[in-house]
Image: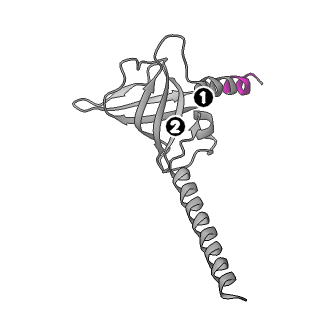
Amino acid sequence: MKPRRKQRLVLVSLLIAGVAVAAGLALLALQENINLFFSPSQVAAGDAPSNTPFRLGGMVVDGSVRRSDGSLEIQFDLTDTANSVTVAYTGILPDLFREGQGIVAQGSLGTDGTFSATQVLAKHDETYMPPEVTEALEKAKAIGVQ
């Protein structure tokens, strides 16, 4: 093989290897930042990963809000009308948070089955509900009717 051709082959090989490494790093970064959504029924069925951040959406169960005296710790149950998941959160809740309210909580599922939220989002008006929550509630109602 001629030296010039060998030099081109090495250059093309290095270029292909560099592109492969860059694509692999980009995919790894995207995989770490993916934010999946699960309903309480999916969490109860074991579809949700443990100790991995994801979003959990549903309705706050009436009478389930428990606040700790002297701290910002709060626990409440979140349901999609078929199953419920206990959510633990430390912090200031949104002004629109209340029982019977549709919310989305971001956090991870602990080994004890309690969802540890790092952020709680409440709907912004009386008619809006996040599409994921609406879809999860409709699926749960369809399962419960059958």
Q: What element does badge 1 sit on? A: helix
Which one is nearer the viewer's eye here, 133 or 141?
133
Give the labeled residue for mark 1. Answer: 132
Could you tell me how far apart the alpha carbons at marks 2 and 1 are, in whole angstroms?
10 Å
Which one is nearer the viewer's eye here, 90 or 16?
16
Q: Residues within 10 Å of mark 2 (few under 14, many from 20)?
A: many
Q: Quadrant of the N terminus?
A: bottom right
Report the residue at 71% width, 25% height from top: 144
Mark 2 is on which residue type? Answer: Arg
What stretch of residues is rendered in magenta? 140-145
Give the labeled residue for mark 2. Answer: 55
| For residue 146, side relative to residue 116 (left or right) | right
Report the residue at 29% width, 31% height from top: 68
Q: Residue 58: x and y, percent?
A: 54, 27
Main SS of the magenta part reads helix
Q: Quadrant of the C terminus?
A: top right
Q: Look at the picture and state if 88 lies above or below 92.
A: below
Report the residue at 54% width, 45% height from top: 34
Residue at the limit of the structure toward the right, as seen here: 146
Numbered tag placed on residue 29 in the rendering: none
